[in-house]
Structure formats: structure tokens, C-alpha cells
């Protein structure tokens, strides 16, 4: 007896045997049992997921001698003829080679005649999108009002090429790509029936390579059995098809997330020496990071993750160590790398550079992370972690014991930390002075006076600072932070950067005659809040906006 390949040997013969298409088989079963069978159906989906198989089972169910029945007997002559492909009443047509208007006219003419044996004459047209526009138009009238004994079943991988007028006359079924887990389960059952010993990792590798097509997976298994026999391990699958093991992909994923560039280069070199398909590696990594993104957003219960438990555990472990924004940047870099590699001669070089870009994207903080850390710093600062606590304690000390003296540098530090708030508060009492206060800085304190430095650029308007109302407003605003009322004296600074203080210069040493060179950034670096943020992010100030 001639050898029969596994894809044909394991072809489902009942609706219940069709893998991964329960939404289709349940609808067809209910339609047959309730007597609501339409005159035309169209099955849509990628290769190897059960379109033609579903069409044949439907034809067999309609013409079974015990039917129409949702459970054809598979033993009557009608069922056997359909299974063998030689039924006179079930006509299978290849749309690619019979796509002309003349062939459709012949079909239309023959459809008028009653079936030879069963209750229905059934036309199964595979790859129906290959029909020409003229052929489609010739079929329209018959398809819309066929004889009562005629049923049409179409199958296509490219529904966009089918005329809308044809689609509107059919019941449409969109078949899904079969999940990795469903393919693994089906192959495991078939191997058990055939007495084949195969590891779980080998089954998973075959299922990954099939990309949702069960027929592809069965054909791959057939080839591996010819290569290895009935004892199959993952390495056998990887050797035959040039795939990369799940463990290598996971190691590469971890190296990217941890920005381990030497590790990335070593893994790519090993894959290249082993003759792996580097273009496919990029697609596998895209799938890995897509799954990681799903776990980040939806957790373990995400319905989009139809994977073995071991893989879900891996994604959960690393989801806790990264952030979704970084994963999205990695995915963008992988998509760009895939596009470049398609037309490149040196795929290894492009893969290495692309994965290094991915690793850099993985270590770069996102805006959300920065905002979160800034919010945390702000929270800590307000709770007393920074100089706010110093200001509050200073005010408390002076209130409790007016004779108690606090170092002048402490008071200056308090005023510097809150000078913008002091200026804003003073401006409520004297709004016209606000713009002048913005260019001032407290420089020293004695027993009775607070000396405030002004920018020499505004020396010509010094009379504006000498107004009693201005001084009182500023003194009262400062009292809230240092706990005592001081007289205000204004004096020009030597430097033109009036409101800026060098980060490494003692406040008490700066006065009207100070020779310290003041720069715009130095004062802000000295601000406790700004200093905390800059140190936390190991950054620098590039611009100041008020």
C-alpha cells in the first residue's frame, strides 16, 4: 500500500475533530440540526487551518445516507466517495486553473441537473479569489438564486480579491490561525497513536515554525520522522529547519533587557556559526517581546496568551523588571531591523547593530518613569526629606525661643530654597514689584537685617526697591520661613547674574563686593530641590524656563 503523508492521514473526518475552529464547527452543526443550511458558504483564512477540510466535512454531512446529519457515518458509499474525492455529487474545482468565464458558464449549465446519488449537488471552489471578474459576474445569478439541490462552498486565502457582490451572497466564516498550544496537543496525540516518542520542546519548536498552520506542522513532523526516526528531540527539529531553541531566544531576550551587549554579540555569533536563519530570529524576538508586552498590560490571565505554562512564567518574571514603554521601543527597533535585513547581504552585522539598539532602548528611562520618580522626589521633599524640614524646624526654633540664635548660613539656605515662594507671596502685597524681585537673591543676614542682592542691570531703578511697602512685603514673606522679622536692605551685586548663586560657594561669603563669578546654572544647581533631582537622574540642566 502506498505511503500516506501524515497531513492526509490525520485529516479530520468529523466537525469535532477540526482543531481550533470551534466557532465554525458549532455554527455548521447547529445549522444542519435545525435545517437552516444556507445555499452558499465561504471559508476564509491562511493556509493549513482547515478551510477545505471543513468544506468536505460539510459536504459529507449534507449527502450522508443517514442525513443531512451533523455526524456523518463515514461508512456509507456517499461518505466514502467524498472522503476519497471521487463523488459525482461533490465537485471540487481549483479556482486558480479554472478561473475563466467559460469554465463558470459550464458550471452554471451543469448545476441545473439533479444530483446522481445524494440530495445535493455541492460545488467546492478552492482559492476562489483567483476567478476573473468576468467569471465572478457569470456566477452571480446562479449564486443568488441557485436550484434547490445546489450548494456552493468557497475557500480563499485572500478575501480582499473576492467581489463584494459574491461575499454578500454567502455566509462568511473567518477561520483563525491555530494556536501553538492546540498544534502541540494535536501533534502529541498523533505521535502517541503512531508510537512516536517526541519531547515537549521538540513539539513546541515544530508548532512555532508552523506559524499557525496545522498542516505545515504535520508536514514538518513527517519530514523529521524521515530524518530521525521515532525518537525525536528538540535538537533534531532545530537542525532540520534552522530554528533557534526557546532557551536561546529567552537568553537573548534577557540580554537585551539587561543591556548585556557582550552577551548579545556572543549569542548572535553562535547562531551564525550554527547556520540559523537570522531573519527568522528577528521575527521570533518580535513575538517574544509582544508576549512580554501582553503580560505587562494584562497579566497572566490575558486571553491573547495561548502558551505553555513554562513560557508564561518566564514572561511574568521579566515583566516585573521592565516597563512597557521600553518594550515598545524595543519592538520598534526590531521592526526596523527586520526591514533592513530583508535586502542586506550581511545579515549578521545588521542583526548585531539592531539588537544593540534594542539594548540601549531597554536601558533608557521612559517619560512615565521620569515623571514617577520626580513625583516621588517631590513627595519626599514635602515630607521633610529635603530642606523643607530645615525651614520648618528653623521657624519653630525662633518661635519657641526668640533668644536662640541659628547660624546665618542656615537661614540663608532656607531663604534660597524658598526664594521663589517668598517672592510670589510678597508680590501679592505689592504686585508691581514682582518682576524686580525675580532678579534678586538673599546674600547675608545679621542680627536685624536681611541683605538682598540686586542685579546691577537694574541699578538705575534702585528707587523701586527702596519703597517701604516693597520692603515690608518682602520681610513678612521671609518671616514665614525663618521665624523672625528683619529689616530689608537692597544692595547691587558685583556680578551681572544677580539672582544666581555658585553651587560650591558659601552663602555667607557672597555679598555686594563678592568676586565670585555667578552663572545662570549655578544658582539652580544650589537649589536643594533641583540638586536632588539632578543627582537622582545623574543629569544636567540644559535650559531654564519660568
Image: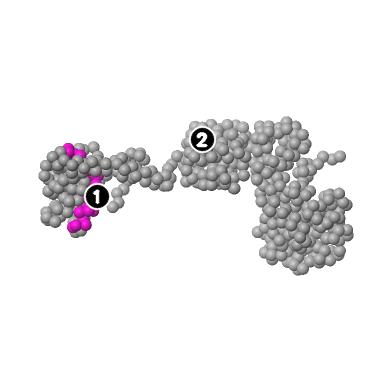
Task: Please say if the residues under marks 1 and 2 sit with CB atoms less than 8 Å apart.
Answer: no
Disc 1 crowd rating (10 Å Cα; few below 14, some 14-19, many 20+) is some
Question: Which of the pair 193/270 is nearer the observer?
Answer: 193
Question: In this view of the protein, can residue 174 be seen by the observer?
Answer: yes
Secondary element type, mark 1? helix
| Residue 114 numbered mark, or none | none
Which residue lies most toward the front here? Answer: 400
State the colouring used for the structure image: one colour
Q: Residue at x 84, y 58 (%)?
A: 89
Magenta residue check for 376: no
The residue that mark 1 highlights is: 420
Q: On the rendered image, what quadrant is the N terminus found in? A: top right
Badge 2 local density, few (<14 within 10 Å), some, or many (20+)? many
Q: Main secondary structure of the magenta part?
A: helix
Relative placement, left or right, of 541 versus 490 is right
Q: Which residue is mark 2?
A: 255
Disc 2 on helix, strand or loop?
Answer: helix
Residue 376 image position (x, y, % from top left): 37, 43
Q: Nearer the viewer, mark 1 or mark 2?
A: 1
From the top left corner, tell me how far across and down residue 7 is, in percent: 76, 44
Q: Of 325 and 62, which appears nearest the observer? A: 62
Which residue corresponds to the image point at 31% horizontal and 43% vertical from the top-left? Answer: 383
Rendered residue at 19%/41% (across/down) = 397
Query: How many numbered circles does the render carry?
Result: 2
Magenta span: 406-430
Say which of 106 and 532 sits in front: 532
Residue 212 position in % (x across, y down): 66, 46
In percent of the image, x 50 and y 44: which residue is there? Answer: 327
User: In 3D space, how far apart are the residues under numbered discs 1 and 2 (Cα atoms)?
Assistant: 46 Å
Asked if residue 300 is positioned above or below residue 104 in the image, the reply reads above
In the rendered structure, which disc, 1 or 2, sits on the residue that comes first in sequence? 2
For residue 408: magenta?
A: yes
Amino acid at each position: 500500500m502506498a505511503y500516506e503523508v501524515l497531513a492526509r492521514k490525520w485529516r479530520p473526518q468529523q466537525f469535532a475533530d477540526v482543531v481550533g475552529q470551534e466557532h465554525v464547527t458549532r455554527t455548521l452543526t447547529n445549522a444542519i440540526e435545525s435545517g437552516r443550511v444556507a445555499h452558499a458558504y465561504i471559508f476564509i483564512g491562511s493556509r493549513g487551518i482547515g478551510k477545505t477540510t471543513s468544506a468536505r466535512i460539510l459536504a459529507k454531512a449534507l449527502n450522508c445516507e443517514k442525513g443531512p446529519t451533523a455526524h456523518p457515518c463515514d461508512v456509507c458509499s456517499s461518505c466514502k466517495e467524498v472522503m476519497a474525492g471521487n463523488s459525482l455529487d461533490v465537485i471540487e474545482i481549483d479556482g486558480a486553473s479554472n478561473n475563466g468565464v467559460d469554465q463558470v458558464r459550464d458550471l452554471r449549465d451543469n448545476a441545473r441537473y439533479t444530483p446522481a446519488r445524494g440530495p445535493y449537488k455541492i460545488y467546492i471552489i478552492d482559492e476562489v479569489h483567483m476567478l476573473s471578474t468576468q467569471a465572478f459576474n457569470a456566477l452571480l445569478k446562479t449564486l443568488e438564486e441557485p436550484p434547490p439541490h445546489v450548494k456552493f462552498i468557497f475557500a480563499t486565502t485572500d478575501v480582499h480579491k473576492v467581489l463584494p457582490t459574491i461575499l454578500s451572497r454567502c455566509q462568511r466564516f473567518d477561520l483563525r490561525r491555530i494556536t501553538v498550544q492546540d498544534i502541540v496537543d494535536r501533534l502529541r496525540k498523533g505521535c502517541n497513536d503512531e508510537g512516536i516518542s517526541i519531547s515537549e520542546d521538540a513539539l513546541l519548536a515544530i508548532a512555532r515554525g508552523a506559524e499557525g498552520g496545522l498542516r505545515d506542522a504535520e508536514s514538518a513532523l513527517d519530514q523529521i520522522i524521515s530524518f530521525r526516526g521515532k525518537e525525536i528531540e528538540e535538537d533534531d527539529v532545530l537542525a532540520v529547519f534552522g530554528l533557534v531553541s526557546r532557551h536561546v531566544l529567552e537568553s537573548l531576550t534577557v540580554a537585551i533587557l539587561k543591556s548585556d551587549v557582550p552577551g548579545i554579540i556572543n549569542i548572535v555569533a553562535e547562531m551564525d556559526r550554527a547556520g540559523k536563519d537570522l531573519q527568522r530570529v528577528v521575527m521570533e524576538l518580535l513575538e517574544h517581546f509582544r508576549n512580554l508586552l501582553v503580560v505587562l498590560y494584562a497579566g497572566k490571565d490575558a486571553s491573547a496568551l495561548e502558551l505553555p505554562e513554562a513560557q508564561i512564567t518566564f514572561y511574568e518574571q521579566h515583566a516585573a523588571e521592565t516597563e512597557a514603554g521600553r518594550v515598545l521601543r524595543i519592538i520598534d527597533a526590531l521592526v526596523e531591523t527586520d526591514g533592513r535585513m530583508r535586502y542586506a547581504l550581511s545579515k549578521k552585522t545588521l542583526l548585531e547593530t539592531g539588537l544593540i539598539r534594542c539594548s540601549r532602548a531597554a536601558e533608557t528611562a521612559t517619560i512615565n518613569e521620569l515623571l514617577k520618580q520626580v513625583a516621588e522626589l517631590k513627595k519626599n521633599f514635602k515630607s521633610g526629606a529635603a530642606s523643607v524640614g530645615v525651614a520648618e524646624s528653623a521657624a519653630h526654633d525662633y518661635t519657641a525661643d526668640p533668644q536662640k540664635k541659628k547660624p546665618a548660613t542656615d537661614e540663608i539656605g532656607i531663604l534660597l530654597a524658598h526664594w521663589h515662594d517668598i517672592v510670589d507671596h510678597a508680590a501679592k502685597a505689592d504686585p508691581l514689584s514682582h518682576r524686580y524681585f525675580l532678579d534678586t537673591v538673599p546674600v547675608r543676614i545679621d542680627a536685624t537685617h536681611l541683605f538682598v542682592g540686586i542685579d546691577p542691570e537694574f541699578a538705575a531703578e534702585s528707587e523701586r526697591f527702596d519703597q517701604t511697602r516693597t520692603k515690608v512685603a518682602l520681610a513678612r514673606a521671609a518671616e514665614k520661613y525663618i521665624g523672625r522679622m528683619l529689616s530689608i536692605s537692597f544692595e547691587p551685586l558685583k556680578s551681572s547674574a544677580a539672582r544666581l548663586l555658585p553651587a560650591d560657594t558659601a552663602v555667607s561669603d557672597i555679598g555686594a563686593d563678592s568676586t565670585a563669578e555667578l552663572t545662570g546654572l549655578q544658582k539652580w544647581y544650589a537649589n536643594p530641590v533641583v540638586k536632588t533631582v539632578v543627582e537622582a537622574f545623574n543629569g544636567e540642566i540644559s535650559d531654564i524656563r519660568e
